[in-house]
Image (cartoon, rainbow, N blue to C red):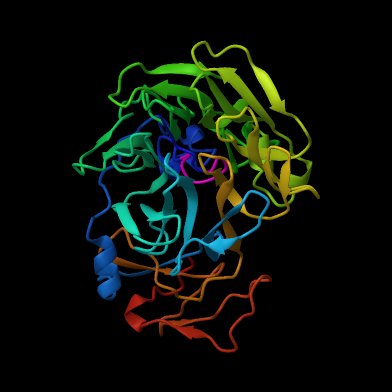
Amino acid sequence: MLSLLASPLLALAIGPSAAYAACPYAQQMGLDLNVRDIPHSPSPSAHQSGRRGLGKDGVMLMNRIAPGTSKLYISDIDGGNERPLLSDPVFEYHASFSPDGQWVLFTSERNGDGNSDIWRVRTKGSDLQPLVTTPAVEDSVVLSTSGTHAAYASTEGMIANIWVLDLVTGNRWNLTDTPAIAATTNKTSPDSQWIAFSSDRNTKWAGHGWETFMGLSGWEHTQELSIFAIRPDGTGFRKVIGKEGYALGSPSWSADGKRIVYYEMTRETTWDAHSSFDVNSANSSIVSVDFATGTDRVVEVNTSGVKIYPQYLGSTSSIGYLLKGTTKEGIYSGTTYYNTTARSPAWSPDGKRVVYEKVSWDIRPQNKLLYSWDANWTYRFTDVFPTINTAGRQPSPKNSSANPPSSPSTLPAQTAKPSSTL
């Protein structure tokens, strides 16, 4: 079975139109939020062109509100014998074990800061291999029991879908490429006959908090999710379980394939859970249901705090999960507790080891080269609110989380736009 475990609070909630879906007021402007067609796809050569030199139209400065570093670690479930997974980490996250426990599959941005691809490496850190590397977002990869197919989430074609990769032939196909089956995150069943995934299909855009303008709530996106299933050949699509006003995410299978465990939180909590201001007061539950019927709902864990990334441990009924926030933050493997601020844990098939990422919030260097999706432009990192004069001089913005340089940074004059603020 394949199951994609994308971050429940990040990344793949691309929505119908990435640009307009981010704006709660687009509907008031008469924009169709269900339009999925985008005029053009990213140029496959955009990254290479951007790395060779300046784009002919100039530089786009982008502030990326994200950790400055993200490194994968592997350890025993109590945190013992912890070590880095990779000898040459770049920016990696969302790892999972192969069913035989010999490989770790993960997302990496080693082809360019901001462009996520999927890779694998042996648990000892050897035989690093790319699986899929395109200008689209590839994330949350999992391997089938046979080891011959991988399922992953991708925005290739400008919308989030689940794709399947044949590791023997190299062929890959879009599994959920219709509006009726568009999806975000998935995971394969133990017998490789089903892929379970979470999706926001048939839901409307929703914002966080109180009404701010013309009856609409704030611009921060909140998300309602349900659990669906589909066979690897695209047949058998069905809804397993949903709950109006709630997000049900990160589905994972029991060893016998009869039950699915997932996190459950209110739609509003999807904002609180990733806000440092509100996470300590937010709550979620770990819930399981019978896969065949979607019934026999059991609340497995209902303690306080945001509980995500549930997974059955080996062939037992014990469940591992991440508790985020509160004074008891860490990785829970049944009754074993590892006090850590790590993220996205995934357990080995025998339930004895766990892989996860650790992040830091170091600010990227001003003007650091980023991945470019447009060959005509060079993308570079900036701290907040940059301003460039006609001579190409750029005052370094002051940020409370970074030490500002002692002198202004300089960009080539031809990249500057007079009186521009990006």
- Tell me what residue is drawn at x 41 percent, y 70 percent: 380
Asked whether the viewer can see residue 143, the reply is yes
Query: Image check: 359 left or right of 376?
Result: right
- Quadrant in the rendering for residue 65: bottom right
Residue plotted at (66% across, 55% down): 79
Q: Is residue 278 visible?
A: no
Figure check: 200 above or below 393: above
Q: Is residue 390 above or below residue 205?
A: below
Is residue 207 or residue 393 the one in the foreground? 207
User: Is residue 387 highlighted in magenta?
Assistant: no
x and y percentages locating residue 399 in the rendered image: 64, 72
Quarter of the image for residue 88 reads bottom left
Q: Count numbered badges in the picture.
A: 0
As displayed, is residue 151 above or below residue 132?
above
Decide whether residue 8 is among the magenta residues: yes
Where residue 362 appears, as percent x and y from the top left, is 59, 70
Q: Which residues are magenta?
A: 7-13
Q: In the rendered view, does 346 fall on the left or right side of 31? A: right
Horizontal placement of 95 versus 246: left or right? left
Image vertical order of residue 367 relative to residue 31, above or below: below
Q: Main secondary structure of the magenta part?
A: loop
Residue reaching furthest to the bottom: 407
Position of the N terminus, as image quadrant, is top left
Between 81 and 236, the residue placed more toward the observer is 81
Give percent across and percent down for residue 215: 63, 30
Location of residue 253 in the rendering, given as x and y in whole percent from the top left corner: 51, 28
Q: Residue at x 46, y 64 (%)?
A: 86
Task: Compare residues 300 and 30 and report the one nearer the observer.
Answer: 300
Residue drawn 30% across and 41% down? 38
Q: Quadrant of residue 34?
A: top left
